Amino acid sequence: MELKDLRNKNICLLGLGLENFSLAQYLVKQGIKATVLDKRVPKELGDRYKKLKAAAFNFLCGPSY
């Protein structure tokens, strides 16, 4: 599988820590969208949430993520 093949796949990132945030930014540059799951709410994710939401990432946040 090549990176370009991910454009047609459902991708999920579990947690939005430093490493997954960097990965998400890389995916955005490659034109790949993903869904981020995190037990924290958007307010707790702060700027990371805002930047990825602006890049059209989907989020499932909160205790019942």
Image (spheres, rainbow, N blue to C red):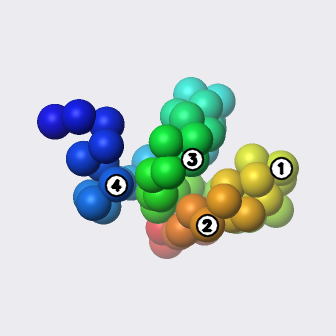
Cβ atoms under marks 1 and 4 closer than 8 Å: no
Q: How far apart are marks 4 and 3 (CA)?
A: 10 Å
Which label number is shown at residue 47? 1
Q: What residue type is labelled 3?
A: Val
- For label 2, the SS is loop
Q: In this view, does 7 lie to the left or right of 13?
A: left
Q: Can residue 20 be seen in this view?
A: no
User: Residue 53, position in %: x, y?
Assistant: 69, 64
N-terminal label among 1 and 4: 4
**Comparing marks 1 and 4, which lies closer to the viewer?**
4
Cβ atoms under marks 3 and 1 closer than 8 Å: no
Residue drawn at point x = 57 percent, y = 47 percent: 28
Q: Name the residue under label 2.
A: 56
Q: What residue type is labelled 2?
A: Ala
Q: Name the residue under label 4.
A: 7
User: Residue 8, position in %: x, y?
Assistant: 27, 60
Q: Can residue 28 be seen in this view?
A: yes
Residue drawn at point x = 16 percent, y = 36 percent: 1
| Residue at the limit of the structure toward the top, as seen here | 19
Q: How far apart are marks 4 and 2 (CA)?
A: 14 Å
Q: Distance between the residues labelled 1 and 4?
A: 25 Å
**Comparing marks 1 and 2, which lies closer to the viewer?**
2
